[in-house]
Image: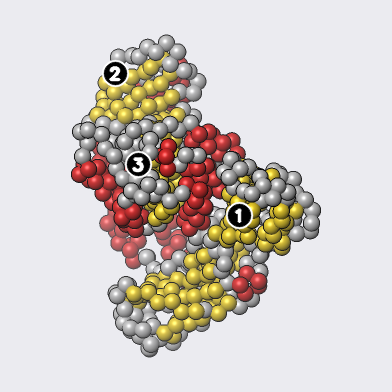
């Protein structure tokens, strides 16, 4: 039956028209790890700990809710680590910034440690739909203690960079070259191989600006410098233009040697309370950040009062709720010389954007990549009042990938790529379908195929459920329980798992003791290749290797993995080690 079902599924794998759309920046959430060198040399290269302020500004620039940010502080070992925290409001951002303020320095430096640990953090789990990145900050070359070798460090670094590359984790490197001893070539290699960027500065004062650039670059936004000035001790005016109603967030960062005072008026001239429901305000000794949510279109008036003779630098990053969506092509098979019509729309919140000004100010182009030669060409498209249109001729009998790029002074967006082929000539005998005929055909095929797929899927699901429910376990779990009030620890208990079928919960393993009733919501099932799969819906905190082990949606446990579970209702910690 399985063979028959698989064959039928393949036969039904017909191309169904679809809309290709890239994620808008406001829809995109990040999983970021800030990995910072805290060796003693930073005392000299970053006297005022501007690197700490830069990391805090990166946190403040993150979305009000949804982004996850973690911190790794390293020398030649991990000094302190903060597992990625999902930001749900200002309180979470303050928790991250407080952690950064408490970092301490130590001797020696090993770049491999900072990269390897950051990669491990993201390997342990990136939230679905989030885009990962690592920001690596260092101020020099390796300085290893006795017994450590550069060769071993290089091996660890190379392996970590390869893992990041394989998993699509870009590493943005920042080199603070205060003493001229920075290994720029190595930082450049790390960034290029993983798809990140390298930044080098001789002064820590540039770090907040660099972190802003990394945030914008990763989300395909652009930093717009606003006119800076030298403070005179009074309020000085700066105009902040919001070009369209499609701006979801306007992030205004103000860098200065000392704290500043700010006032803000909307385009109508009405002064806005700071902070408020629509305006998020954060500041430190090195920067101030104003985040305006869904700002009204027009000129806002920003007033800044700084300490006399302080240099004030101001940057603006717009975060747009925009996607580029291509209209499905009439075919995916062409002949060399065929003319292919291309059309796309800007979308916001699932709807076409009704903003002629946005189209007018944007530069649109078609990016065509020859998949055989790996050569890309870019040709202009025409922006109309509500769409982007153009055409191109298929050059040769090759496979191609095409996408629409839309760019203006504040943002860059690309549609999802669409693959076409010119290797098999299109048949001239069949007349071209009209769009209505094509749509009707697809609807009929989709309805027939969809019903059959539902029946097949139900049969396969039933079979899979039966097999899963009766699948056995291998190995054993070693259980220890520590009382956090008294410090007492139970002797290791070896729980063989072969007696269970399909699934079991931790409460069963603990002999249903009433004190541990909450562990009934921690469920184990057989995993792939003799692993365990754990689902934690208990509210208890699970950790692996010192990092929070998010398992609400299920996580694999491998042989020799050690999991620590902090109970919520009683002050006890359960340690589990999986042995095969």
Image x and y of residue 459, in percent: 37, 51
Q: Nearer the viewer, residue 305 or 534?
A: 305
Which mark sits nearer the N-terminus, 2 or 3?
3
Distance, label 2 to label 1, CA atoms, is 61 Å
Left or right side of 324 for 575:
left
The quarter of the picture where residue 411 lies is bottom right
Q: Do tag 2 and tag 3 residues touch (Cβ < 8 Å)?
A: no
Q: Secondary structure at mark 3?
A: helix
The residue identified by callout 2 is 493
Image x and y of residue 225, in percent: 58, 60
Which mark sits nearer the N-terminus, 2 or 1?
1
Left or right side of 2 for 255:
right
Distance, label 2 to label 3, CA atoms, is 36 Å
Vertical side of 265 occupied by 374: above or below: below
Q: Nearer the viewer, residue 407 or 305?
A: 305
Disc number for residue 314:
1
Vertical side of 438 occupied by 128: above or below: above
Q: Residue at x 58, y 72 (%)?
A: 362
Vertical side of 478 occupied by 370: above or below: below
Distance, label 1 to label 3, CA atoms, is 31 Å
Q: Residue at x 39, y 49 (%)?
A: 177
Q: Residue at x 40, y 19 (%)?
A: 512
Task: Using a 10 Å C-alpha cutoff, classify the residue at mark 2 as few (fewer than 14 neighbours), some (14 to 19) or many (20 or more).
Answer: some
Task: Using a 10 Å C-alpha cutoff, classify the residue at mark 1 as few (fewer than 14 neighbours), some (14 to 19) or many (20 or more).
Answer: many
The residue identified by callout 3 is 114
Q: Residue at x 47, y 43 (%)?
A: 51
Q: Nearer the viewer, residue 54 or 298?
A: 54
Foreground mark, 1 or 3, reads: 1
Image x and y of residue 69, in percent: 48, 42
């Amino acid at each position: 039956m399985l063979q028959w079902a698989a064959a039928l599924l393949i036969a039904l794998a017909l191309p169904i028209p679809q809309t290709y759309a890239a994620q808008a920046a406001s829809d995109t959430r990040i999983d970021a790890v800030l990995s910072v060198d805290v060796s003693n040399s930073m005392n000299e290269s970053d006297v005022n700990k501007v690197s700490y302020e830069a990391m805090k500004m990166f946190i403040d620039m993150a979305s009000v809710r949804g982004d996850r940010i973690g911190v790794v502080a390293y020398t030649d070992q991990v000094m302190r680590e903060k597992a990625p925290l999902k930001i749900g409001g200002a309180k979470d951002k303050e928790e991250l910034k407080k952690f950064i303020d408490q970092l301490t320095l130590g001797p020696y430096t090993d770049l491999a440690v900072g990269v390897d640990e950051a990669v491990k953090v993201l390997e342990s789990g990136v939230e679905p739909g989030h885009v990962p990145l690592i920001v690596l900050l260092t101020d020099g070359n390796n300085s290893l203690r006795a017994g450590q070798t550069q060769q071993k460090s290089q091996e660890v670094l190379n392996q970590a960079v390869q893992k990041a590359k394989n998993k699509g984790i870009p590493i943005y490197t920042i080199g603070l070259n205060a003493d001229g001893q920075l290994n720029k070539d190595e930082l450049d290699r790390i960034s290029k191989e993983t798809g990140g960027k390298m930044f080098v500065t001789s002064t820590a004062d540039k770090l907040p600006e660099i972190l802003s650039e990394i945030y914008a670059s990763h989300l395909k936004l652009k930093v717009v410098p606003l006119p800076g000035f030298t403070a005179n001790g009074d309020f000085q005016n700066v105009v902040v233009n919001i070009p369209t109603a499609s701006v979801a967030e306007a992030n205004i960062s103000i860098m200065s040697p000392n704290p500043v005072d700010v006032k803000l008026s909307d385009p109508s001239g009405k002064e806005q309370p700071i902070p408020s429901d629509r305006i998020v305000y954060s500041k430190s000794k090195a920067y101030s950040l104003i985040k305006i949510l869904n700002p009204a279109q027009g000129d806002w008036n920003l007033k800044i009062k700084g300490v006399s003779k302080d240099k004030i630098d101001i940057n603006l990053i717009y975060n747009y709720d925009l996607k580029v969506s291509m209209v499905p092509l009439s075919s995916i098979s062409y002949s060399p010389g065929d003319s292919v019509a291309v059309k796309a729309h800007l979308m916001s919140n699932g709807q076409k954007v009704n903003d002629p000004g946005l189209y007018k100010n944007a530069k649109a182009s078609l990016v065509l990549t020859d998949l055989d030669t790996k050569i890309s060409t870019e040709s202009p498209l025409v922006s109309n009042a509500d769409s982007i249109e153009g055409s191109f001729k298929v050059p040769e009998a090759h496979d191609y990938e095409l996408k629409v790029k839309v760019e203006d002074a504040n943002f860059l967006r690309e549609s999802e790529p669409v693959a076409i082929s010119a290797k098999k000539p299109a048949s001239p005998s069949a007349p071209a379908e009209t769009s209505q005929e094509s749509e009707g055909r697809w609807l009929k095929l989709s309805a027939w195929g969809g019903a059959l797929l539902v029946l097949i899927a139900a049969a396969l699901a039933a079979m899979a459920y039966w097999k899963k429910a009766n699948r056995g376990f291998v190995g054993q779990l070693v259980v220890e329980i520590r009382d956090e009030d008294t410090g007492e620890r139970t002797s290791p208990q070896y729980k063989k798992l072969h007696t269970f079928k399909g699934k079991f919960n931790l409460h069963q393993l603990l002999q249903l003791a009433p004190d541990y009733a909450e562990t009934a919501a921690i469920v184990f099932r057989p995993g792939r290749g003799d692993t365990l799969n754990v689902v934690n819906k208990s509210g208890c905190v699970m950790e692996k290797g010192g990092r929070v082990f998010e398992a609400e949606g299920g996580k694999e446990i491998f042989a020799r993995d050690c999991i620590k579970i902090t109970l919520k209702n009683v002050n006890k910690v359960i340690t589990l080690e999986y042995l095969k």
